[in-house]
């Protein structure tokens, strides 16, 4: 379905990413799942094709593109059926490196951005901790000033690209007296810095080709100019990119949902049972048709939300709706698609088995559904009040 939101440039990008997914990701994805990581060469190839710098400034080798480009990238990667691959790429392009783009000094940008765009440097963002997930303000990792340096102490959990990243954007408390969201700052920490180590690589239910790690900071000394953005304002700077992060997670959910439905329609049209095909069964046909309708609605909300972000509006209400809706919907879609694949949906020979596992995290990570619903509810109240007053 063509859309009022996209230019020719957007459509061209979509077809280029689609070709890359068909030619490179689908044939190799299973080997990457086995290996538990994505080869750097593949990411470098994406860099050379311009896929990693679409949103980055032209000055540093990027294309200066808008949020609609991120939505396209996420949706098309979602179609690959390899959620671990999508997560590896999108954390780098849309969840970690945007913090540098938004808050970096000229020197920091000059030093890192060209190599981020080419994938010579892979990035991660470390916010979540063992005792602080949804409640970001509860973080305890601390950074104290010591002469010309900062010294980090603490631990981060569930960090995507954590074991393989060359540059980690770390959130830490810089004012122990400030409460909650105040007194948090962001730092650029390079792999190999003394006192920074990967605690363990986590084995997961899904996203198996994506590396997820625990990171440990013990008396980790980093230079004074490793501070990213304004001192003590890190929480607000983290929040600034949350909408983009949730947009791409939702884009993945929409792409995965559409792909699972396409595969299932092909399957039930072929599968013979009770003197016909499974598609002949109205119960199956109609259930798939309703899911198609709901996925299409989510897709239009994805495009509209991306467009709102591209216009410079905060889009919190729409993006929260999108994340809550698509994160739950993708799991409903996967459940039905696995059901209609019968026993074949339960064995590892079919993509649907992996897609079921990969989809599960999309209602948890980057803002759990319940947290998104509260964001919507807070804003909904304002609307209701204005209606009552009239
Ligand atoms: C595979 C994977 C990759 C990740 N990658 C990263 C990364 O790269 N960087 C990073 O910083 N973090 C990352 N995360 C962390 C992720 O963002 C958190 O897991 C998520 O924010 C939820 O936090 P939590 O796990 O601590 O759950 P909790 O905050 O303990 O919440 C548990 C559950 O309680 C419910 N809940 C929470 N709050 C509320 C509420 N207010 N009202 C009602 N119910 C609520 C939700 O159902 C939630 O799932 C990743 C996680 C996973 C699993």
Image (cartoon, rainbow, N blue to C red):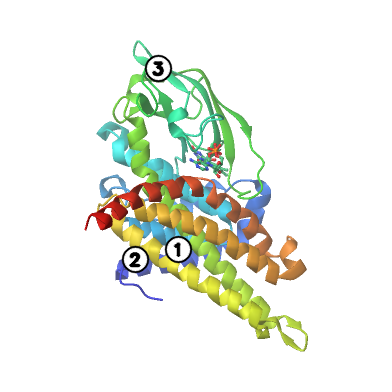
First reached walking from the N terminus: tag 3 or tag 2? 2
Pinpoint residue 299: horizontal percent, then vertical percent.
43, 66
Q: What secondary structure is found at the residue carrying circle 3?
A: loop
Q: CA distance from mark 3 to mark 2?
A: 46 Å
Check the image and name the residue furthest to the bottom.
Answer: 275
Check the image and name the residue furthest to the left.
Answer: 390
Q: Residue at x 36, y 56 (%)?
A: 318
Check the image and name the residue furthest to the top.
Answer: 147
Q: Residues within 10 Å of mark 2 (few under 14, many from 20)?
A: some
Name the image quarter holding residue 319.
bottom left
Q: Is residue 159 left or right of residue 59?
A: right
Name the image quarter holding residue 350.
bottom right
Residue identified by numbered label 1: 17
The residue lying toward the viewer, choosing from 171 and 43, is 171
The residue lying toward the viewer, choosing from 109 and 100, is 100
The residue lying toward the viewer, choosing from 274 and 23, is 274
Q: Residues within 10 Å of mark 3 (few under 14, many from 20)?
A: some
Residue identified by numbered label 2: 10
Pinpoint residue 367: horizontal percent, then vertical percent.
47, 45
Q: Judge whether residue 39 can be spotted in this image.
A: yes
Q: CA distance from mark 2 to mark 1?
A: 11 Å
Q: Residues within 10 Å of mark 1 (few under 14, many from 20)?
A: many
First reached walking from the N terminus: tag 2 or tag 1? 2
Q: What secondary structure is found at the residue carrying circle 2?
A: helix
Q: Is residue 126 left or right of residue 114?
A: right
Residue identified by numbered label 3: 176
Q: CA distance from mark 1 to mark 3?
A: 45 Å
Q: Residue at x 37, y 75 (%)?
A: 2
> Which marked residue is nearer to the observer: mark 2 or mark 1?
2
């Amino acid at each position: 379905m063509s859309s009022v939101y996209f230019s020719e440039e957007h459509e061209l990008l979509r077809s280029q990413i689609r070709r890359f997914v068909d030619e490179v990701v689908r044939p190799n994805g299973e080997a990457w799942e086995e290996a538990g990581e994505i080869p750097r060469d593949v990411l470098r190839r994406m860099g050379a094709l311009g896929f990693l710098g679409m949103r980055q400034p032209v000055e540093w080798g990027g294309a200066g593109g808008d949020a609609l480009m991120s939505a396209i990238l996420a949706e098309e990667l979602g179609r690959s059926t390899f959620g671990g691959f999508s997560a590896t790429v999108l954390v780098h392009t849309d969840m970690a490196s945007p913090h540098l783009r938004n808050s970096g000094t000229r020197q920091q940008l000059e030093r890192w951005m060209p190599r981020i765009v080419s994938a010579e440097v892979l990035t991660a963002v470390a916010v979540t901790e063992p005792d602080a997930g949804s409640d970001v303000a509860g973080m305890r990792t601390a950074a104290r000033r010591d002469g010309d340096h900062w010294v980090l102490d603490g631990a981060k959990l569930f960090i995507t690209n954590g074991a393989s990243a060359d540059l980690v954007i770390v959130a830490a408390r810089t004012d122990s007296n400030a409460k909650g969201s105040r007194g948090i700052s962001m730092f650029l920490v390079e792999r190999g810095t003394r006192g920074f180590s990967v605690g363990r690589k986590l084995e997961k239910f899904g996203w198996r080709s994506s590396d997820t790690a625990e990171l440990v900071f013990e008396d980790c000394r980093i230079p004074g100019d490793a501070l990213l953005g304004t001192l003590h304002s890190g929480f607000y700077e983290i929040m600034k990119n949350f909408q983009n992060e949730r947009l791409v997670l939702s884009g993945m959910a929409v792409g995965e949902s559409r792909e699972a439905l396409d595969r299932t329609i092909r399957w039930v049209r072929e599968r013979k049972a009770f003197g016909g095909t499974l598609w002949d069964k109205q119960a199956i046909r109609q259930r798939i048709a309703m899911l198609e309708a709901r996925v299409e609605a989510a897709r239009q909300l994805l495009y509209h939300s991306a467009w709102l972000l591209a216009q410079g509006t905060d889009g919190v209400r729409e993006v929260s709706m999108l994340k809550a809706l698509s994160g739950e919907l993708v799991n409903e879609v996967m459940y039905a698609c696995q059901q209609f694949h019968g026993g074949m949906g339960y064995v590892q020979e079919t993509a649907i088995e992996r897609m079921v596992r990969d989809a599960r995290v999309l209602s948890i990570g980057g803002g759990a559904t319940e947290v998104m619903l509260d964001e919507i509810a807070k804003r909904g109240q304002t609307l209701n009040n204005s209606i009552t007053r009239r």
